[in-house]
Amino acid sequence: MFLNNRIYVTNGQDPEHGAGDGVLTCWDATKSGDVTATGKIWFSDKIHRSIASPSIVGDLLFVGDFSGYIHCFDTNTGQKYWEFPSGARMWGSTMVADGKIYFGNDGNQVYNHGKATKEAPKVLSKVKLKDYVRSTPVVANGVIYIVSNTHLFAIQKK
């Protein structure tokens, strides 16, 4: 994720190796050359391995990890506010729309987490699909699109 001259990156060993340690790092995008020592603003080793891109709202960063946890961090300091166990592995990224956090997991579930705040969220809705969700939900023109292993779903408020 790139925002305000900062790059937010997750990494960890390939998820095919199972659960394990990961890192979330914030880099200064105005630096050049070898920025290993000079470009790192902050990092956190308080996530599991992840292949997801973070989503950001204001000063809050939300990211899922392969172990199935959603984490909330301060974008400026790297302070971790909370984590939420989704109950199954996550391959896709979180998505924030209308101030709410959305994500899917290998437990065939899609979550709407309510307000994107630094207080631990309350689940507004959880939908069980017939197959796992390894993609990131997408919003366009008031419709949420969710891809499972076998179907494309379009959800719109009536």
Image (spheres, rainbow, N blue to C red):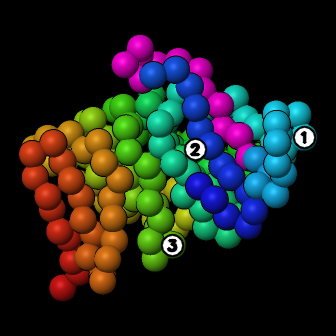
Q: Indicate the amino acid at tag 2.
A: His
In space, the residues marked 2 and 1 are separated at their CA atoms by 26 Å
The mark nearer the N terminus, 2 or 3, is 2
Q: Which residue is mark 2?
A: 71
Q: Indicate the amino acid at tag 1.
A: Thr
Please state which of residues 157 and 145 is positioned toward the viewer in this rendering.
145
Query: Is-magenta flag for residue 144?
Result: no
- Eye-nearest disc, 3 or 1: 1
Q: Which residues are magenta?
A: 15-26
Say left or right for 22 vs 152.
Answer: right
Which residue is rendered at x = 24% and y = 65% of the image?
A: 145
Q: Which residue is mark 1?
A: 38
Query: Is-magenta flag for residue 21?
Result: yes
Question: In the image, is residue 137 above or below residue 35?
Answer: below
Q: Which residue is mark 3?
A: 99
Viewer can see residue 113:
no
In space, the residues marked 3 and 1 are separated at their CA atoms by 34 Å
Residue 8 placement (x, y as % from top left)? 66, 49
Q: Indicate the amino acid at tag 3.
A: Gly
Q: Quadrant of the N terminus?
A: bottom right
